[in-house]
Image (cartoon, rainbow, N blue to C red):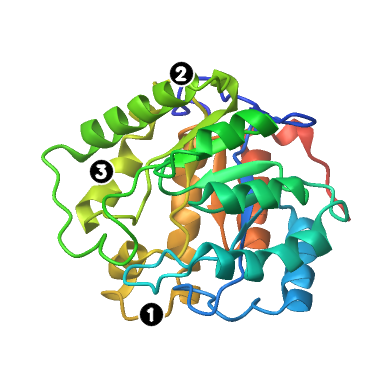
Amino acid sequence: MSDIRQTLAKRPILGRDFVLEPERRPLIMGILNVTPDSFSDGGTFFQKDDAYAHAVQMVEDGADIIDIGGESTRPGSDYADAAEELRRIMPVIESIAGKIPVPISVDTRRARVARRALEAGCRIINDVSACRDPEMPAVAREFDVPIIIMHMLGDPDSMQDDPVYEDVVREVTEFLASKAEMLEQHGIDQDKIIVDPGIGFGKRFQDNLDLLKSIDTIRSLGYPVTIGASRKRFIGELLDSGSSRPDERLSGNLAVAAWCYRSNVEIIRVHDVKETVGYYRVADAIEHPSDYTASW
């Protein structure tokens, strides 16, 4: 693979009290949805004890970050207000923070929720709305944490109704550049900003493929990149016209993981942590065989 890897070097993820080095493979962000209605695992980890056990398991499987969210952002999802979002996530964050050796990110669009989560021990903000809440930049600056800003056309309840682009790669790249500049103007250090093209968020089938193919264009902005394509509908459509359940799309998820490896992506957000880590270990061993020895 070394002859086709992209030339842009990976950027580290710099927290207030941690540094994550992507090195040769992307960092693995394990998804922990504390919701009753997420598209893939809604309800599975809704109870605190189940969520805690799953977080610990993902860390044991090799996750570098655990991403906790209390609001489903699947297409057509129901609205959950800030109070309900906090009711879902805070017991889980409080039970996990300080008990696992990796940073926790909070997946939220609300500055109020982000603040409470950071006070409880989260160390990264993952904002799928790219700071539509005008107070979010101030929270990120105050706590001096990395913030992921994602492109989403519309809102979760309507984003897939009729998304239209003239040039999806150009439009998404320009949007992320403008939002990153806005954060810098609010006093956020450039090395704390991470961009995400929003695969599956207000995107048509072809848009998702075009954005993945053009990761290097997004990386040229100069910020670390997060890709979250795990179990998305376009993968199901490629595999079997979309009839499979989201948790049956592992082969497609790993194909995206392979492309992110090739493209020097810094973070990949996944449900299937163990399988993704295993794929990267084998891929890395093939590229760097002298770094590995047999365990038998």
The amino acid marked with disc number 1 is Ser
Depth check, front residue: 35 or 204: 35
Above or below 25: residue 246: below
Distance between the alpha carbons at the discs numbered 3 and 1: 23 Å
In the image, taking residue 20 as reference, residue 269 lies left or right, namely: left
Numbered disc in front, either 3 or 2 = 2
Point out residue 119 in the picture as x, y percentages from the top left corner. Answer: 75, 47
Point out residue 274 in the picture as x, y percentages from the top left corner. Answer: 68, 61
The amino acid marked with disc number 2 is Gln
- The residue that appears at 78% across and 32% down in the rendered structure is 18
Proximity of marks 1 and 2: CB atoms separated by less than 8 Å: no
User: Which dot marks residue 244?
Assistant: 1
- The residue that appears at 38% across and 48% down in the rendered structure is 198
In the image, taking residue 34 as reference, residue 80 lies left or right, namely: left
Q: Secondary structure at mark 3?
A: helix
Res 155 → quadrant? bottom left
The amino acid marked with disc number 3 is Asp
To which residue does mark 2 refer?
185
Q: Specify which label sits upstream in the sequence, 1 or 2.
A: 2
To which residue does mark 3 refer?
210
Point out residue 31 in the picture as x, y percentages from the top left corner. Answer: 60, 60
